[in-house]
Image (tube, rainbow, N blue to C red):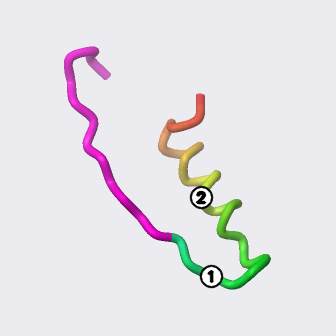
Amino acid sequence: MPANSEKEHLSIVICGHVDSGKSTTTGRLLFELGGIP
């Protein structure tokens, strides 16, 4: 990605019961999209 390009922001909400995998889903999404190097 070029240094001068702007990243588009996206706000999401993850809802669910306790132990339903919210953190796992969020972490996996960040990893797959390159948010975690």
User: In terms of secondary structure, what is the magenta stretch mainly?
Assistant: loop
Residue indicated by mark 2: 26
Question: Looking at the rendering, in which quadrant would you find the C terminus?
Answer: top right
Q: Residue at x 75, y 80 (%)?
A: 18
Residue extent of the magenta highlight: 1-13
Distance from Cα at disc 1 to Cα at disc 2: 12 Å
**Disc number for residue 1:** none
The amino acid marked with disc number 1 is: Gly
Which label's residue is closer to the chain start, 1 or 2? 1
Query: x and y percent of residue 21 in the render?
Result: 71, 71
Q: Do the CB atoms of the residues marked 1 and 2 lie less than 8 Å apart?
A: no
Asked whether, in this view, residue 25 is left or right of residue 20, the answer is left
Q: Is residue 9 above or below residue 37?
A: below
Residue indicated by mark 1: 16
Q: Is residue 11 above or below residue 34?
A: below
Query: x and y percent of residue 13 in the render?
Result: 46, 69
Q: Residue at x 41, y 64 (%)?
A: 12
- Identify the secondary structure beneath mark 2: helix
Determine if the magenta segment contains residue 26.
no
